[in-house]
Amino acid sequence: MAVTVSPERDTVAATPMQRALREAFYAGAIALGLFMLFIGLKTDQNISNELILVQRWGLLAAVVIATAVGRFLYVAYGQPFLANQKIADVATGLLPASVASRFFLFPAFIVAVIVAALLFVFSRSLAGWVGAEPAGYLQFLRALAVIYALACVIYYFRGFIHANFTKLGIAALVLYPIIVVGMLSLMSWSLVGGLQGSLKWVDNFGIQILIYVMLAWGLNIVVGLAGLLDLGYVAFYAVGAYAYALLGTHYGLSFWILLPAAGAMAAFWGVLLGFPVLRLRGDYLAIVTLAFGEIIRLVIINWREVTNGSAGISGIPKVTFFGLMSFNVSDPNYIGKVLNIATSSAYYKIFLYYLILGLALLTAFVTVRLRRMPVGRAWEALREDEIACRSLGINTTTTKLTAFATGAMFGGFAGSFFAARQGFVSPESFVFLESAIILAIVVLGGMGSLVGIAVAALVMIGGTEVLRELDFLKQVFGPDFTPELYRMLLFGMAMVIVMLWKPRGFVGSREPTAFLKVRRAVSSSFTKEGHG
């Protein structure tokens, strides 16, 4: 049988370089349209308090050019490189060396360690030696060297880290304040200087991240395990915070008494929320929970006789070490006086760090244990198919209420800790954006995955805090540039990238907790008519 071959088309396919130029032009045009009003124009006020528009065409041009160049390099060189990585060598039959093996080289690792160590030791003298502006760039170089060195360590020991990730993570969290104080003490050649310098690192990068980890793990019970979309989780956070603030200021009760009380109060409101939404699913459930979060916030604002309205509640008592030691310098049982050590405000922050670490680990432990119990398996069944869940005889009413109550309880614990840490609460801390951030952490980390959620919280919350440290960018974009104002833009870009790269999250897994590991024959008595 003859085979006919169609003649070649007259049109010639575009070369990779032509395609790269075309896509770079499209990317630049899209960036120009998206960022013209966000970056090119800025609203400000003059000396007469009149609204004016500040034109920043240079910054807009830099962003558009960077976008176009990035797209060109990716299409022209990145895509062909990634495609060649999948082609085996004809002579040897082996795939090319991975990008990581060519990037994480041992000599480069040694250089990065030396550079980071030298810049750490002479950090206080850099500004006097080279000036303020070059010192900012050297600090950025130090950060890059530390990141590269840590990435090399993770790459070289990736097998061991993967096998013992949980143990290593807990050990790193326990040693984090000690490591921070030790490094800062070496830099300042003083233990007192190291304690005072650790305040920012322990509070902003330790306590802040662990609060969101605990909140996300609590919401994971509702969203990740039970499959109930909750957009008003911040309401339970607010209930716990105000329960501790009101009872602590008016009745002088201890934190250790109010912590379970705040959790019980939040769980009670979780049950109250669960009853109206028993028959709702999907978008309708999300709308009701969103309304619940807004109702709680508006009640806090308008019930001024109790909550003090928008002014908030101040003077919230601090946490004590089980009543044995206090962290107020004026108290006779101040920790410095009891242990005969130097006075420092860092003791309280370090104590709060270990407190929230213990609460977060308690949340993880309870979640893991509940997943293996019948109630946890009922949550997973409810998540996969509610109709099939009912057909199996599972009480979906009780299942939903337990999910809402358990998740709300951990939100209440986090809220009471937040109030004790801040010493002040106000409605501005419990807006819808907080619920959106917590839900985004759960989704990006992988619904149902405790490790993935912790990594997502570290990246999102820690990345936001890192933006506050990038002062050297003011030397590039001008003294009025504030990097933290662009955190939501970077947050949105990160969400889009992660959803394209890992649609199920960093550690996405929907495997059930209970399943048969060995195939078993099913008795014929179960497959007769009426039985299966």
Image (cartoon, rainbow, N blue to C red):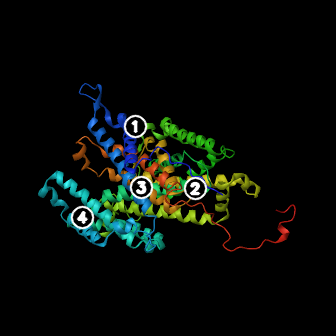
Q: Between marks 4 and 3, how big is the CA–CA gap?
A: 52 Å
Report the residue at 44% width, 56% height from top.
457
Circle number at residue 356: none
Report the residue at 47% width, 44% height from top.
10
**Residue projecting furthest to the right:** 529
Residue 299 seen in render: yes
**SS for callout 1:** helix
**Residue projecting furthest to the front:** 2
Q: Tell me whether circle 1 and circle 2 mark residues in contact (CB < 8 Å).
A: no
Report the residue at 28% width, 63% height from top.
145
Q: Tell me whether circle 2 and circle 4 mark residues in contact (CB < 8 Å).
A: no
Q: Earlier in the sequence, mark 4 or mark 1?
A: 1
**SS for callout 3:** helix
Residue 38: give x, y in percent of width and height: 36, 36
Q: With 508 as the anchor, is 478 left or right in this view?
A: left
Residue position marked by numbered label 4 in the rendering: 192
Residue position marked by numbered label 1 in the rendering: 34
Residue position marked by numbered label 2 in the rendering: 224
Q: Between marks 1 and 2, how big is the CA–CA gap?
A: 33 Å
What's under tag 1, amino acid-wise?
Answer: Leu
Residue position marked by numbered label 3 in the rendering: 79
Badge 3: residue crowd in 10 Å (few <14, some 14–19, many ≥20): few
Q: Between marks 2 and 4, how big is the CA–CA gap?
A: 44 Å
The one nearer the camera, 517 or 333, is: 517
**Residue projecting furthest to the left:** 129
Q: Tell me whether circle 4 and circle 3 mark residues in contact (CB < 8 Å).
A: no
Q: Tell me whether circle 3 and circle 1 mark residues in contact (CB < 8 Å).
A: no
Kindly report which numbered mark, 4 or 1, lies closer to the viewer in this rendering: 1
